[in-house]
Image (cartoon, helix red, strand yellow):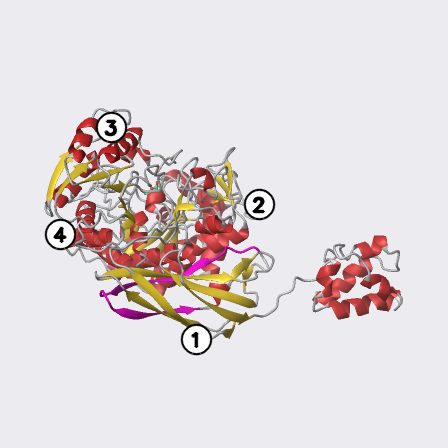
């Protein structure tokens, strides 16, 4: 429907009808107004599978394909693969009469303890942004809408409805918002879901700076913003700030708030922004209704009800899992060749493949690792541990006996479902005690042991040096069993890489001591130093670094070439490298490009990911891989000018297969516009020395004091601010003179 037709409809609506549209009809759909032909649309979770609730409430959901959660998908480092997952999700949404899929979830992983880390992609905003953009592109290509969530900074579950996240401007821009910026600009989601928490004092559901100034005005977002379920605090302020749809519906209560705000009657004053005077105009309500209806009509018109092929989607789920699982260690034990394998661990028959909470999918076809492995070779199973009781050690003996009599043992273990879920954070990174003891005892009798980990977030690995192989399978979706078997037996060559660092100890994590906060607030005191940015800056070794992952083949990097060795800050630079598969198995490599500023003026990470490409190469062959770098790849956020800034100087471009292994590097000299802070009475004499306004400033001062003051000026201590010339030099300058001169020079 055309904008003008929607406008005509809005003109015919009563105020009651308008505000009724701005709150959900129930938990999963928008309000319809039959008299005006306004349809309702259906919304459904979630990021990695449809959770279409039967009926209007919170009941069991309709069976659907459970794709790998974002924690695993992101390890593919493959935007196209993410798109493929999105396309399948879009098809299922069409088949289930869902018009908006509530995802992707795109928050940055600040702490491995975060309860929803399994739903989020990465600690790095470039990787996270690209994966989410792929998912959005895929879903929307099937004419289904998306809700990019949770905007912004939902980094923890503890007190998630009320916690105040205190974050400096630079960290917000470079890390937490950057993760949303790329998908908003590139993939244009039909909607964005605001987070529960506060950011720097304001609830995200009524945060004008976030929802309007940044999201709409800076990034050009054109869809509508919906609340997370129950995130609305002050409804009228929400509309003022840019929150169009409240979910789920709250019925009369908040409709009345909006009507009162328009009619100038009493509305709730709690947590109100002083700039918002508790008054809304009809124009503001109309604008919100317009933004919502544009999406509602567009998506309703594109409903096609087409049935979808769930068995094809299962294969897609397996493919994504295979492309993403990460081989962390291999002392020649993998791929498995011949002999008999002891498969140990309840997760081999009762797999852990998704996380708990609103993203929980009623999966159609869950494959068990044990069944899938038995298709490849001789296997025998022992339970080894119980998932229900961490302190049950009774199953260890049988497992050890079995392992000792086989050629190798594969222990499938990880975090039980109750360990990680939406709604609460973990308090430690340990596997259950019975699993750790099992691993210890099995390894003593069977050194040829492989650990397959099923977890939604990093775990401690006290066994890392004792076992011969580790496959990080994360949460692999319903096809995890097949993917694990395909990788262990070498049908497929592992090619996933870690989208997050695994710390050696929780205490090494940058958020340690400031997670999950106290007294209602949490301070992100690590600033921009999240994940590898922190470990590298502080030289802290990790258990496994960001971007790390092994293959059954070997890759060699050579010949890095830059299109320019000197460039302007706005020039594009092309980087070309040669990648060779020097092993004897075809395989895929994730080529990662990092940028480092050699002598930064401000504190900057050692290096930052700016590009990545997944390349398939036949054994013995080579490929050229090309990247393009733009201004943003060299920029940082300057919180004085409130903008992206590039400082001229030398930058190193590093390319390799992991953040800790970049064999190629080349230098580029970037010429950038020089920035100077405006002169103020607080400018120090040392800053003045190199300031472009220095000459005119001194001239003005001397015109009042006389030339003889020049020498005194030149000899002022370099760390003194200019205002000291009034009190310390007993000149003829008054503070008012100084302020006038400075204002004049700054052009005020
Ligand atoms: C979650 C959202 C989810 C919504 C609807 C909320 O609790 O935070 O991610 O989309 O519920 O289920």
**Residue appearing at x 43%, y 38% in the figure:** 506
Magenta stretch, residue numbers: 603-629
Is 252 rendered above or below residue 394?
Answer: below
Q: Nearer the viewer, residue 360 or 672?
A: 672
Q: Nearer the viewer, residue 254 or 447?
A: 447
Q: Which residue is mark 3?
A: 388
Q: Is residue 575 magenta?
A: no
**Mark 3 vs mark 1, CA separation in Å:** 58 Å
Which comes before the other along the chain, label 2 or label 4?
2
The number of callouts visible is 4
**Residue appearing at x 62%, y 66% in the figure:** 675
Mark 1 is surrounded, within 10 Å at the Cα level, by few (under 14), some (14 to 19) or many (20 or more) other residues, namely few
Q: Are marks 4 and 3 in contact (CB under 8 Å)?
A: no
Q: Secondary structure at mark 4?
A: helix
**Mark 2 vs mark 1, CA separation in Å:** 52 Å
Q: Is residue 241 visible?
A: no
Q: Secondary structure at mark 2?
A: loop
Q: Nearer the viewer, mark 1 or mark 4?
A: 1
Label of residue 563 in the image: 1
**Mark 2 vs mark 4, CA separation in Å:** 55 Å
**Mark 2 vs mark 3, CA separation in Å:** 51 Å
Q: Nearer the viewer, residue 582 or 699?
A: 582
Q: Secondary structure at mark 3?
A: loop
Q: Nearer the viewer, mark 2 or mark 3?
A: 3
Q: Is residue 622 magenta?
A: yes
Label of residue 274 in the image: 2
Q: Main secondary structure of the magenta part?
A: strand
Write down which quadrant ligand 1 falls in: top left
Quarter-of-image position of residue 689? bottom right
Is 386 rendered above or below residue 42?
Answer: above
Label of residue 311 in the image: 4
């Amino acid at each position: 429907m055309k904008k003008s037709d929607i406008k005509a409809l809005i003109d015919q609506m009563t105020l009651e009808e308008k505000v009724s549209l701005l709150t959900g009809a129930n938990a999963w759909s928008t309000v319809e107004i039959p008299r005006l032909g306004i349809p309702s649309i259906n919304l459904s979770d979630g990021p990695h599978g449809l959770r279409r609730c039967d009926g209007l409430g919170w009941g069991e959901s309709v069976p659907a394909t459970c794709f790998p959660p974002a924690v695993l998908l992101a390890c593919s480092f493959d935007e196209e693969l993410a798109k493929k997952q999105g396309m399948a999700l879009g098809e299922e949404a069409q088949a289930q009469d869902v018009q908006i899929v509530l995802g992707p979830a795109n928050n940055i992983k600040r702490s491995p303890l975060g309860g929803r880390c399994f739903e989020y992609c990465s600690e790095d905003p470039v990787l996270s942004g690209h994966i989410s953009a792929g998912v959005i592109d895929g879903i929307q290509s099937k004419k289904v809408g998306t809700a990019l969530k949770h905007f912004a900074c939902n980094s923890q579950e503890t007190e998630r409805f009320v916690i105040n996240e205190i974050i400096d401007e630079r960290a917000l821009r470079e890390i937490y918002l950057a993760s949303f910026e790329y998908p908003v600009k590139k993939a244009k989601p039909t909607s964005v879901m605001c987070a529960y928490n506060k950011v720097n004092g304001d609830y995200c559901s009524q945060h004008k700076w976030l929802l309007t100034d940044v999201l709409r005005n800076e990034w050009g977002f054109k869809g509508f913003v919906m609340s997370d379920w129950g995130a609305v605090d002050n409804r009228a302020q929400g509309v003022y700030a840019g929150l169009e749809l409240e979910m789920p519906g709250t019925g009369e209560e908040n409709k009345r708030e909006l009507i009162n705000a328009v009619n100038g009657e009493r509305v709730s004053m709690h947590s109100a922004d002083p700039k918002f005077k508790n008054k809304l105009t009809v124009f503001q309500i109309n604008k919100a209704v317009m933004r919502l209806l544009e999406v509602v009509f567009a998506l309703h018109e594109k409903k096609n009800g087409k049935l979808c092929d769930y068995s094809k989607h299962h294969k897609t789920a397996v493919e994504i899992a295979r492309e993403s699982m990460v081989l962390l260690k291999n002392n020649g034990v993998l791929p498995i060749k011949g002999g008999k394998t002891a498969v140990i661990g309840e997760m081999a028959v009762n797999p852990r493949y998704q996380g708990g909470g609103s993203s929980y999918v009623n999966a159609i076809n869950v494959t068990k690792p044990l069944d899938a492995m038995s298709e490849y070779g001789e296997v025998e199973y022992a339970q080894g541990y119980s998932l229900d009781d961490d302190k049950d050690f009774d199953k260890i003996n049988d497992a050890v006996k079995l392992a000792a009599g086989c050629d190798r043992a594969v222990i499938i273990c990880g975090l039980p479902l109750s360990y990680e879920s939406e709604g609460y954070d973990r308090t430690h990174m340990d596997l259950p005690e019975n699993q750790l003891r099992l691993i210890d005892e099995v390894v003593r009798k069977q050194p040829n042991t492989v650990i397959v980990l099923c977890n939604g977030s990093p775990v401690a690995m006290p066994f890392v040096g004792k076992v011969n192989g580790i496959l990080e399978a994360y949460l692999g979706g319903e096809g995890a069993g097949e993917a694990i078997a395909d990788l262990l037996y070498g049908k497929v060559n592992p090619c996933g890489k870690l989208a997050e660092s695994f710390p050696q100890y929780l205490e090494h994590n940058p958020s340690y001591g400031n997670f999950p906060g106290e007294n209602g607030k949490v301070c992100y005191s690590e600033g921009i130093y999240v994940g590898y940015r922190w470990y590298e800056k502080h030289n802290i070794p990790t258990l496994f670094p960001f971007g790390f992952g092994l293959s059954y083949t070997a890759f060699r990097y050579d010949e890095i070439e830059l299109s320019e060795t000197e460039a302007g800050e706005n020039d594009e630079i092309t980087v070309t490298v040669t990648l060779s598969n020097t092993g004897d198995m075809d395989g895929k490599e994730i080529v990662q490009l990092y940028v480092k500023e050699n002598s930064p003026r401000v504190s900057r990470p050692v290096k930052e990911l700016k590009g990545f490409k997944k390349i398939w190469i036949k054994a013995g062959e080579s490929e050229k891989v090309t990247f393009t770098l733009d201004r943003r790849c060299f920029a940082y956020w300057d919180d004085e000018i409130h903008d992206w800034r590039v400082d001229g100087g030398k930058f190193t471009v590093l390319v390799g297969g992991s953040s800790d292994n970049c064999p190629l590097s080349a230098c580029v000299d970037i010429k950038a516009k020089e920035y100077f802070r405006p002169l103020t009475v607080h400018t120090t004499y040392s800053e003045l020395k190199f300031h472009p306004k220095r000459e005119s400033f001194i001239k003005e001062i001397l015109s009042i004091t006389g030339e003889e003051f020049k020498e005194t000026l030149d000899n002022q201590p370099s760390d003194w601010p200019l205002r000291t010339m009034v009190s310390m030099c007993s000149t003829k300058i008054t503070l008012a003179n100084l302020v006038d001169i400075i204002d004049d020079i700054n052009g005020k």
